[in-house]
Amino acid sequence: MPVGGTTSGFGFRSQVATASQPTARVPVIPVPFETKLSRHRFALMQATLDCVRAPDADRASFGAALAQALDLMSEFHPLRDSVPDRFALAKVAMVALASCGQVMPGPLTPEISARLRPFIDSLAQPSVAGKDPLKLSQRNNHQLFGGVILLLWSGLVDADAHREEGLARIARFVATIDDDGLFPSETVRGASAAWYCNLAVMMLTTAQWIGRCQGQAPFEEEILRRAVTGLASVVAAPDRLHKSARANMYPHAEHGTNPFNLDMRFLHGYHSSRHYMTWVPIYCALYPGATLPDVLTGRMTEDLFPMGNEFCGGFADAIIPPVTTLT
């Protein structure tokens, strides 16, 4: 039976409402904050891909999707200050910046940069100023992602200060890589440990791609190769992560609470319309001829979806072609 109709759950009309007793209104369930942002981010990613595939086509859909994303930034940035909410907004900023770079080569227009600048400026505040350096989000992928966004922003608006802060954050994260090619801030995430190791590789690959487009690599190529090798090692032998994963710090709700049952679903398929191996074709474009371990790529041959993810800045097909410009 359709939701919101006048028929009761048992298939007959309710006789409760009368002329003197108005029918009660069905409460409107608000769309969760992250869900709302997620829908608009994906719409902008898709509109960007459409423009890259057909450069001469009408860009009205892209313009509308970008305007909606910028409206969300303006609406929610002053009101949301929790770590999850700011991370969700950072993903909007990443997609907006990357989309502009892919569709509109050259510096950001004054209007677009003005809409994004308040959030970018707040993101660029030194991560240790007035904050707890022991807090996980002050040293994990949140800081790395912030660095990647600042790096991308600096290339689109020629902002040296933001670039330096972005490079500093990336450098701090990269410096934590251990002898196994893993990052301790990600391996403590319980059932999500392998998932976050993959996320770190995705962000580092994105940073290297942006650096390639800007003419300066943000860190040594060997770091990324070590991180990829480290990721492959724990996918092949998940028990290698058990010692650190047992700390069980903030596992993703969808991955479960058992730190010894690592979630490996990032290796194949789509999750909320995002492909978490989107970094693979970008990595291969960065290093032509590079061979990735089959344990990472073996399950991707059955994927029928285009590879896209906010952490990479959109769809790989829009990022990699020669027409793509991030500076």
Image (cartoon, helix red, strand yellow):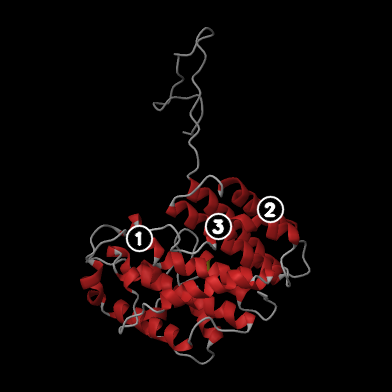
Quickly name the residue at label 1: 135
Q: Nearer the viewer's eye, disc 2 or disc 1?
A: 1
Quickly name the residue at label 3: 122
Query: The residue under label 1 is which amino acid type?
Result: Lys
Q: Judge by depth and name the residue closer to the eye, 184 or 98.
A: 184
Q: Indicate which disc, 2 or 1, sits on the residue closer to the N terminus.
A: 2
The kind of secondary structure element at disc 3 is helix
Q: CA distance from mark 3 to mark 1?
A: 18 Å
Query: The residue under label 2 is which amino acid type?
Result: Ala
Query: The residue under label 3 is which amino acid type?
Result: Ser
* Relative image position of residue 258 (x, y in whole percent): 23, 60
Q: Nearer the viewer's eye, disc 2 or disc 3?
A: 3
Q: Is residue 223 above or below residue 109?
A: below
Q: Is residue 15 above or below residue 316?
A: above
* Relative image position of residue 180 (x, y in whole percent): 30, 83
Quarter of the view holding residue 48:
bottom right
Q: Give the residue at x 70% y 66%.
A: 51
The kind of secondary structure element at disc 2 is helix
* Relative image position of residue 256 (x, y in whole percent): 28, 57
Taking the image as shown, residue 315 lies to the left or right of residue 262, namely right
Q: Give the residue at x 70% y 78%.
A: 323
Quickly name the residue at label 2: 67
Label 2 Cα neighbours within 10 Å, binned few <14 / some 14-19 / many ≥20: some
